[in-house]
Amino acid sequence: MKVITWNVNSYNIRKSQILTLISEKSPDFLLLQETKTDKLEESPYRNLGYKVYHAGGKGRNGVAIISKREAEKLFIGFEAIGEEDPQAKERILGGKFGELYIFSIYVPNGSPVGSDYFFYKIQFIYKLREMLEKLFTPEDLIVLGGDFNVAPEPEDVYDPILLEGQICFNERERKAFKYLLEWGLYDALRVKYPNKKGVFTWWDYQFSAFKKNLGMRLDHLLITKPLSERLREIEVDLKTRGLPKPSDHAPVIADFLD
DNA sequence: ATGACTGGAGTTTCCAGA
């Protein structure tokens, strides 16, 4: 079973790259973030044998699940914990696929540090754990994939001294992210590569950051223990980030034993 | 040339992204 998560930074601009990724990798589940549209077409994916599930707003946010299997149930926003948060409805989309639960997540950026929006981001991460507690147990087969906008450890940014305290790499965000994991999730990349340095998923469009590998690891596949035991391989798709007119994020691709 | 941000909304500029 192959699962890919990718912040595409606009569905419309990245459409052909998305179709290429599907053709080349044939994922069982493709999780998209920042579709930045309220309408996501279905026919190109139907033709390739995929179902499309999308929750998005005009010009901003937007999460999708493109799946070979049909969802038996969908989870949108924080409805499971009784929250009527309109933003969350464009940032959280989950589906039940047999015994698997797959989520596409787009955590708010939260800039600037210390602003109301920053605290909204922190709360958002705590609420994700609350949602898991309400719906599941850590023995369930769960994938939380997406752009979490948090680099969890010093190895996950190109310069931890320079970036300490900045957005996506400060104590409050790392603490919230760790608390989410402590419910019973494993950071799939670190399951396979616990100490590997220089693995990033986002590079600024400016300053030739990708060429110099000045990036951060913000996109994650968080999985429960039974899935971590089935993790075969995981990689960041640098080729897609290197294409002309790329997203600023690279896809993260994981393969599990069936 | 040792280098230059992108996308969306909606208008010719601003804002968010991270």
Image (cartoon, rainbow, N blue to C red):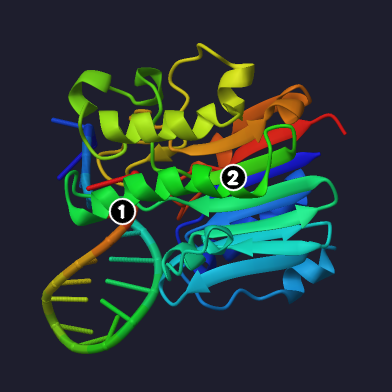
| Quadrant location, the C terminus of chain A | top right
Number of numbered discs on residues: 2
Q: Position of residue A61 (x, y in %)?
A: 44, 64
Residue at the spot of label 1:
A120
Residue at the spot of label 2:
A132
* Along the line of sight, the residue nearer the viewer: A65 or A250: A65
Q: Position of residue A9 (x, y in %)?
A: 45, 58
Q: Position of residue A79 (x, y in %)?
A: 55, 64
| Quadrant location, the N terminus of chain A | top right
Q: Is residue A45 above or below residue A238?
A: below
Instruction: Look at label 2 and name its amino acid.
Output: Leu
Q: Residue at x 54, y 35 (%)?
A: A238
**Secondary structure type for disc 2:** helix
In the image, A186: left or right of A204?
right
Q: Is residue A168 visible?
A: yes
Residue at mark 2: chain: A
* Along the line of sight, the residue nearer the viewer: A131 or A62: A131
Residue at mark 1: chain: A
